[in-house]
Amino acid sequence: MGPTMQKCVQKLDNYLLRLTTGGPAVIESVKKKLAGFTLDVIAETSFATESDANDNPNSPFVVNGYRLFDIPPLRGAAAFFLNKRLLKLLGIESFFQPEAFQYFIDLTRHIVSSRQSGATAARHDLVQLLKDASVYQEDLDTMNYERMTVGEESEDRLAKNTEQVKVTSAERNEKTKRKLTDNEIIANCIVFMIAG
């Protein structure tokens, strides 16, 4: 994802170079331009979408990205302080703007389905990482987290116990792998967008 982020940095750099002749008004717009850069990075690394937020502020991704966080104070207060029954009566399903939230759900669903159908080539982004992620069902059932993680310790342990690893991999060929569902992939991408 490094080259993808570098491309976004280059876009921001080019944009800021064009702005440097603008004088004091430039300082006021820096916050918005950095927010645009953040949206570019999230769009490229999570949603496999090129938004170019600073040069194309009217793209649907950018518009909905800003709208997602444009939360009316009353809605925000209600989402925090009222219980689910009252929120349902008021028609408030989420803290975020429903139309913008739905846009990102639909966008992610479209990306996932086009990757699964082969219409879109695989990319090095969050959607592809989540699509490729899998774990053996037995490890989930037994909560054997040691076998689900990779790190220096697990690599050293595996290197020392090669016979055990061979047996384990032969056994695992017969076991069921569990992959993330489309809804789990969508949820992770939305969290990535919100956290970004």
Image (cartoon, grey):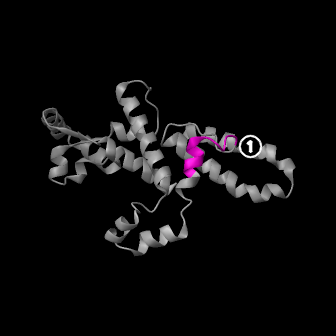
Q: Nearer the viewer, residue 101 or 113?
A: 101
Does residue 56 belong to the magenta stretch?
yes
Where are the magenta residues, as a range? 55-65
What residue sits 44% from the left and 26% below the top? 120
- Left or right, 123 with reference to 53: left
Q: Is residue 145 magenta?
A: no
137 to the left or right of 148: left
In which quarter of the view is residue 28 placed? bottom right
Question: Residue 181's spot in the image, x, y percent?
Answer: 29, 42
- Which image quadrant for residue 155? top left
Residue assigned mark 1: 15
- Outermost residue on the top side: it is 119
* Residue found farthest to the front: 89
The disc labelled 1 sits on which kind of residue? Tyr
Residue 73, horizontal then vertical, whole percent: 54, 70
Where residue 67 sits, quadrant-wise, is bottom right
> Which residue is depicted at the point 18% across and 48% down?
139
Closest to the observer, 154 or 115: 115
